[in-house]
Amino acid sequence: MTTAAAIALLAGDRKDPRYPATPDDELRAYTALALALEELGPRITKHTTSPTDAAYFVQIVERAHRSIGFAQLSATGLAQRTLVHELPGDTLVGINRCLEDPPAYIAGTIDVPEAPASPPKGRTTFRNTVEFLQNTFHISFFEARDRVQAATRLFPGTDVHGIEHPPQFPLLAEALASGKASPQQLADAAKKLVRLQPEIKQYPNSDELSAQLESQVAESVREQDPRTTNKLFNAIEVALAGGVEEPSEEVLRARLGIFCRGTKDGLAEFILRTRAADAEALLALFAQMDNPRTKAGDRDALLRQAGNIWNGSNGSNESPATDTGDAGNRLPSGSAPSLPDYPDFLVDPATGLPMTDPAEANTLTLDPMPTDANVLEAMNNTDYGSDGLTPPQRHLQGLMNLIKTNGRAPNGTKTAGLPSPEIFIITTLAELEGKAAQTGLTLHGQKYTPAELRHALCISGAIPITMNGEGRILDLGTAQRFFPEYMRKAILAVYGGCIFPGCTVPPEHCEIDHDEEAAKGGRTEINGGRPFCSGHHHAKHTGQIRVVRDTDGLFSVILPEFMDPEQKPRRNTYWRQPPMTPPLF
């Protein structure tokens, strides 16, 4: 059956065989075929017993899977070109109605809404195609971003001047269109080739070299398994690095600095790359610390500073004498480790009562190094700033400035480029008095044991934010319109970050919104504030989202109808995971 015949059969020909198929007819036919595939797959799996039929089925499904992968990327490129993120909410609601009743759409009893006749005014529904994909399909920022980038690299496009250009990697694009390779592997290969561009451009014949490497990679993706292709990329990186004596400025921009890899299993991971001259400063630092005969290498002092503190009744940071190899890592005899718990100003969303179960403390996290979009994107961005440095280079320079002070005492004045970070610890009065076995929290979500808390407040220059169960002593009423910094940190301690469901914007980038506008007499108090990122704060004020107070006194968000037809109050569980019901253990 030809495509034209299939369209006529599935979407109709308006009772005129000469009637040309419209884009709407093609879309209805594609919807019908998608529904048929959804039904046929399980039926064939259930009814087929022949191994030869199964072998054919698994191969035709793989072929269809690659075809769908191609369609997914091409649809993403189409969404990018047509600016779907600017569609108004009413139009998106109408599209959802068609998706909820595909047979009616196929039959023509309901239609996809007409495109708006004029460009939108004011703030668009979504900032870009990535945010549209992320919110529509509930996928991560990185997955949505990778789809958009893959579509840009593997399909023809049009630049800002309206000039059409070919795919960035035409050989990979050809393999994608032919269905002879996995779309995901081709997208990954294109991503890796982009990363290699700074190294390739160091060579005088960079265009020819780039085409040659793309040819090798495309052939490997078509003919070899992913592991072999990864070995090819490793070999290419080694060869490129060995062909030049000095890295170019573009390579340094992409690679030099401190890059954050996120937090996993309670450990934060960074990659530090520096020039050889600065590496010498680091090596000299390590050499001093490795020499036990120097003040910098004092073994006992380093052990105490490294966090092996003792849970003594007086809060002392002194450790007992050690007589065995691992005694310095043990608690004093007769003492027991304190059980961590939530601070009493964090309440259980289900009950509205303070969280007191020690087991729940293990699930508490503010995700100090989010592995999702916003912070990692900002911290690892390799674009130059106004100071001529990338963020990773700026962070590295701050670290090198601290190292190169060589232990000299500050003169009381602020030095440019020499950071003096403040550590805020959110705690309770009971913790400070040593009457509670609870855990203090830093603004970035690092957890302290009671002993670590007292130790940090004694010697680390940490600033405590002391709260009672309701935070009433921090309320300022109407005396101040804007939330002061200490109150802002208290509110962020309750919610973690932006309260919009699924938003990963961290506390540093959030704005505090009044429940009742200050201009209308709203009070500046803990219970009347909630954090929003800039985009969702604006969406709240334009009426795209609504905020309601739940029965436990905390705030929840009601999403737009096209995102949540049920219109239920929802919480952002990225920062605060609700308790398991029923508990797993």
Image (spheres, rainbow, N blue to C red):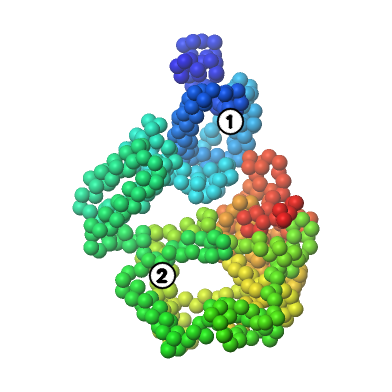
Q: Position of residue 337 (x, y in %)?
A: 68, 74
Camera sees residue 167: no
Tell me: 330 left or right of 1. Answer: right
Tell me: 543 left or right of 295. Answer: right
Q: Which residue is mark 2?
A: 396
Q: Position of residue 39 (x, y in %)?
A: 60, 26
Which residue does the image show at 38% across and 30% down from the upper left? 178
Q: Identify which amino acid the numbered label 2 is placed on.
A: Leu
Camera sees residue 579: yes
Quadrant in the rendering for residue 258: bottom left
Q: Is residue 156 above or below residue 354?
A: above
Q: In the image shown, does 419 or 293 lie closer to the viewer? A: 293
The secondary structure type at the circle numbered 2 is helix
The secondary structure type at the circle numbered 1 is loop
Quadrant where the C terminus sits is bottom right
Q: Is residue 155 above or below residue 26?
A: below
Mark 1 burial class by Cα count in 10 Å: few <14, some 14-19, many 20+: some
Q: Is residue 383 above or below residue 38?
A: below
Q: Which residue is mark 1?
A: 113
The alpha-carbon separation of the residues under discs 2 and 1 comes to: 52 Å
Q: Identify which amino acid the numbered label 1 is placed on.
A: Pro
